[in-house]
Amino acid sequence: MLENNVFKHRISSFGQLLKKMLSLFLTMAGLYIHIPFCKKRCIYCDFYSGVDTSQKARYIRALAMEWESRRSELGESSIDTVYLGGGTPSQLTISELKSLFDRLSGIDWGRCKEVTIEVNPDDLTESYIEGLTSLPINRISMGIQSFEDSDLSFLNRRHTSLQAVEAVKLCQASGFDNLSIDLIYGLPGQTLESWAKNIEMAISLKVPHISAYNLIYEQGTVLYRLLQEGKVEECDDDLALQMFDLLIDRLTCEGFEHYEISNFALPGCYSRHNTAYWQNVPYLGIGASAHSYDGYTRSWNVADLRAYCDKIESGCMAYTVEPLSRDDLYNDLVMTSLRTMWGLDLNKVKSLYGNDRYLYCLKQADGYIRSGHLNLTGECLRLTRKGLFISDAIMSDLFYVD
């Protein structure tokens, strides 16, 4: 790993490969902006955030400075999508959001196809939503997690089920039709019946996009500590699979497309920004802990707000760079492609990484094809419904490890 202020991008021995990859993405790119402020921390969250909001103005200035210093990294690509994630971006006031957007010079907001902000339901007052309509934002991603108040209390969420429902309806009444909600299943004590009620409530709200995640006990979180102390018990694996199975059945029955392992959308309502991640489109991440990918390197900013601001204000870059090998890039393609309904294009594997990786991939996939976990149609590999339940193992087996 190399610090950015001494690292200069250069084409490696597989330069022709990289040129081929980058030529696919000459006209579009994504911008991720990390907003690390929260009113309080959820017990399961391992993303970088904090409850000290005293540095908001300084942080917004630093974001603008980083954008100005790094926007050239995208070359001739135009910004196609922008995503404000966190943390809780809705902890910024409308005037603070306006200040941020005004400082992001050079972005043609009229041509930007998707601008998403993550929000908490209890931040969405009528006046706040009205303020959002005055900004370039055209998509809202709402962290609801559950429509059961007991679940919300356990997770240390700061909204109620009623507030979540009202927030969705307020957004819709204000013209925000491009709306996504997040749900979590596999909670301690959660039953299949209570999860079914969550799904039905989500369907009844007529949102076009639903993301649903199995609860993960990440090291360093309060939830992980509670597990280690024996104060919570993980959901049974078989029950969690039943919940996932029910989710797929109900949402696909309602016309949702299961376009990525954890994501469901009505036709044409996919998250453009996240889909670009899964299709290996380059993106730039600004802000503390934000990650970037330019087609041949990954980089990530320091996960400390004050250290981030100090570096940016002193004219230094705040990120570390990791060059990616040919095998890293092949493995990334396998992982991101198989997560989606579009699958892994084997012609792309051959074109970008050579016949040896193509044959290796087919060999590794063969057993899963015969067992019905993978489907090979033409030159495209896709997970079957059966394969979704062991997707991590399948991807791992298709990785190339020297």
Image (spheres, grey):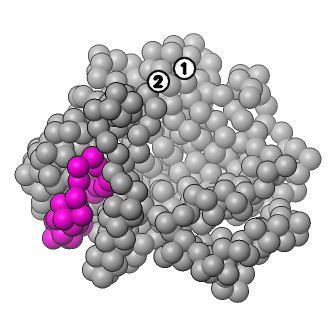
Q: Secondary structure at mark 1?
A: helix
Q: Residue at x 18, y 60 (%)?
A: 194
Q: Are marks 1 and 2 in contact (CB under 8 Å)?
A: yes
Q: Residue at x 85, y 44 (%)?
A: 11
The percent position of residue 70, horizontal first and vertical second, equals 61, 34
Verify whether residue 75 appears in magenta: no
**Left or right, 80 with reference to 279:** left
Mark toward the start of the polypeptide (1 vs 2): 2
Closest to the observer: 24 or 266? Answer: 266
Q: Amino acid at mark 2?
A: Ala
Identify the residue position indicated by label 1 in the image.
Answer: 312
Q: Quadrant of residue 358?
A: bottom right
On the question of residue 124 being in view, the answer is: no
Verify whether residue 202 appears in magenta: yes
Counting every numbered tag in the picture gives 2
Identify the residue position indicated by label 2 in the image.
Answer: 62
Please give the range of residues in magenta.
Answer: 181-207
On screen, 143 above or below 382?
above
The percent position of residue 355, horizontal first and vertical second, equals 88, 70
**Circle number at residue 260:** none
**Left or right, 46 with reference to 3:** left
Closest to the observer: 230 or 390? Answer: 230
